[in-house]
Image (spheres, rainbow, N blue to C red):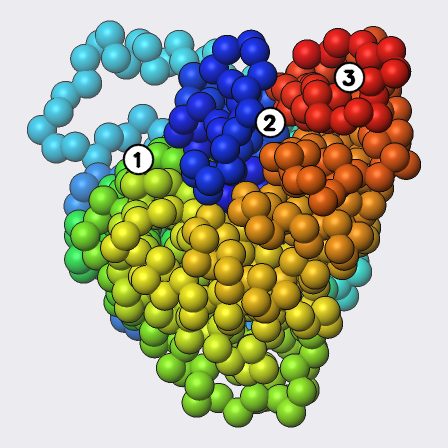
Amino acid sequence: MSNSPSGSTHSSSGRENPVGYPGSTQMKRRNSRESPRAFYEIPSWVENVPSKIINNAKQSLKDMPTSRPYTPRDDSRYILSKLNHDTTSLNTISIDYETESRPMSSKTADVIRRNSKGISDSSTLVAAPPPIRLSKLNHQPSQDQVSSGDSSISSQTKPPLPSNHHQRSNVTSTTTKSSHRRMSSASTKDDSSEENLIWKHEIGPLIETLISAYQKNHFEQFDRTCNDLYSCLSKHNLFGKKSHKKRGELLKTLFSFIESDNSIVRFHVVRLSLAFQISSSNNLRHIIRLTADLTSKKTNDHFFLNSNILDLLFETIPRVDVEQNLEAIAYFCTTLQNLTVNNELICLISEKKPFELIKNILKNLLRLKDQTQLADKLCECLTPLTSALRNLADNDVNRQEFLSDDLIEHLTFILKYFTDKSHENLMKNVARLFSKLTQHTDCCMKLVQCSSCYRSFLKILIKHESNQALVVRICFILGNMMAKSEDARLTFMKDSHALQTLTKLLHSYIQLDSLVLKPDKLDTNDSTSQDVDVVDDPNTNQFRSIENVINKVIRVLSNLAISEENGLIIIRRDDCIDLLFKLLKAPNQHSEELLVHVLMALNNLSYYDDSHSYINRNSETLAQLLVKYIRNEERMDCVVEAFRVLGNLSRTTRIRDILMKCKVDRLAIHHCQSDNVELLYAVIGVLINLTVDEDKRECLKIHHGIDSLINIFEYSIQSDWQLSSLVCKALWNYCDNNYEKADSQPLWFTAHQLKILLNLFDESLHESNLESTDDESLDELNKQLWNEEYFPVASRLYQRIIEGNEYFKTIQINNYS
């Protein structure tokens, strides 16, 4: 019996018309000596039969059972000290608001860029009393302070410029322009007068109360006053009006509060500043940094859950020039990363539809990848941004967002251009994100289409071979891609370094595994994919970690071998296959999960019959190794997989002789009493191949194999047509030519067995007896399985039994053929 690389217990190669299936409608006797090929192979002209589709579907569900590499939820938050800032831009004394009320000349802008001072790099800002000018702010309503950079110039020394003044020499105003200004002034006079009254009588007193509460450290009063101030400004629609001079004065006051270490104060400074739509680079940098600083403590999450600050933030960032404001973007990305460790905030942020904004930031950052002097700053932005995306991916609602536009493709570009050791955290974030996404077929297929990702993955595996956390995730991603796509399998193997890299990885980690001190006794239920942090023994942790990498590498090889083109290449790579043999030879040194993965890989690889195959040249050694595994019922998963490999190896007479000497036929019959369906598929497959040889068929009679097969046949009818079909194939081989023996009962069936079989055929060979459900599509599929898988084999077996038994001569026989 041949096991396909897709994991099916049936042969689906369809290489030729199956032996025993006549080319015509007339039944012909088969000479069992003609060919050892199992008789039930599907003809080559049959394509996409339901059984093949279902076999593939089954395999996709149980593909190399492995879990995503364990990644504990990282609740730690980025603090600002982790970011690398230009120390020349730091100022721990004062942070002043940069005036935005009128356009700046290029000369003024240059002065500001030269003299601007950044916020302190300290994660905790030291509280200081507000500058003396705060107390005079509302007592001098006719004066304004103009700030250039951090230099505050009192309006007493430099009066504010009139609204019609132009900072441009040698320009004379025409009569038309003067007239236009007068008309404009007249049209806005009433509005300005009304706004002045609002600022004087409603907002002014609130500002005075705000300053007083801050000076006295009455933060509850400060909180209430800020809320009232926000409501008042919003009510009168004053947030969007940048022309009023009082706006600048209020923002200067707010910026003077930045030095406070009180979270309430900082929150209100951020909220009001964002609502005022501040736009200068310096102001944005200060405020967004303050936002990131707020999010560094989970005790501040309630500010973001219970206010509109997220809305304001998401309205502000799209207006920011990414290239000119990398530091501000880094603070915003840090804010997102910190907030998305909170599940409630993940849901809230997801409702805000942030992905369009995130994609635009990502695209703009990647456009700067060739500017080497910006590499560190780009990494400071991309690392928290990818961490935030990884957290957002936990919400199933967001998965569709990763399929839109080119988000996944842009993430692969990160792995293409940022692969240095200094980019380790960035690579891990993207790898963890892809580990999550590729578990879903739609996202996995999206990644498969990104042609650059294969070379990037290989590059990382080569450059960072010793980085277990990175290697295990990249291999997990590749394993998912290879399991789901033939294009992925073929594209990956086109790279000349692919198989060599996987072999080298496997060799390196097996060597490392041999040097690790193993636990005294390996728990057969232990999984190397379990949470290693819950184990106290560091040796066990290291052992599991290394085995986890080996598991993932083997899974990639196994899934690559699903493609015949790849499989034939891999089986000729002696050093690669020999490593799998080496693992099998030391069962007590490895977990059951690892051994199962090795056996599954060998099942896929042993499917290919090639004279140059390492497996074929060492098939006797492998068969004897496998016999040891099928005798160890403490590891039943290994028993199942070992029988599957034997199903492939037993296609040759030499191996079948070895199996009979090792009494594998008895073990197979013994396991026919199991309720493990996967095991039944595997052992019946071996029995089918063993009974190809006439001298081996008697084992089914001697060891009560026929009764066991009939029992399986009886309970699998209607519930599993594929399993019923397998039983019929085994029975066909068993009864072939035996009725010619003079010293045996016809066909070696007892009268009781023949009666049971007749009743079962009478029940199952009528299409009208098929069970139905409420699901029409399921009923149709069941009918197709019966028609394609079961009926062709069962009807011929029925006819075969009738023709060879005197028992039925006196019984009315219906023709089901």
Looking at the image, which is closer to me, 227 or 511? 511
Check disc 2 and report its element: helix, strand or loop: helix
- Residue 811 vs residue 488: left or right? right
Q: Quadrant of the N terminus?
A: top right
Q: Position of residue 375 (x, y in %)?
A: 25, 59
Comparing labels 1 and 2, the label whose residue is closer to the camera: 2
Circles 1 and 2: CB distance less than 8 Å? no
Q: Report the amino acid beneath label 2.
A: Ser
Please name the residue that numbered disc 2 is placed on: 51
Look at mark 3 in the image and give the residue it sits on: 765
Checking the image for residue 103, the label placed there is: 1
Q: Position of residue 685 (x, y in %)?
A: 61, 45
- Name the residue located 71 percent from the left edge and 50 percent from the top edge: 700
Which amino acid type corresponds to the residue marked 1 in the rendered image?
A: Pro
Upstream in the sequence, badge 3 or badge 2? 2
The reply to whether residue 52 is visible in this rendering is: no
In space, the residues marked 1 and 2 are separated at their CA atoms by 73 Å
Decide: is 199 above or below 435: above
780 or 741: which is nearer to us? 741
Q: Residue furthest left?
A: 170
Visible in this render: residue 725?
yes
Q: Nearer the N terminus, badge 1 or badge 2?
A: 2
**Is 530 rendered above or below residue 716?**
below
Q: Would you say 170 lies left or right of 768 here?
A: left
Q: Earlier in the sequence, mark 1 or mark 3?
A: 1
What is the crowding at mark 3: few (fewer than 14 residues within 10 Å), some, or many (at least 20)?
many
Mark 1 against mark 3, which lies toward the viewer? 3
Q: Amino acid at mark 3?
A: Leu
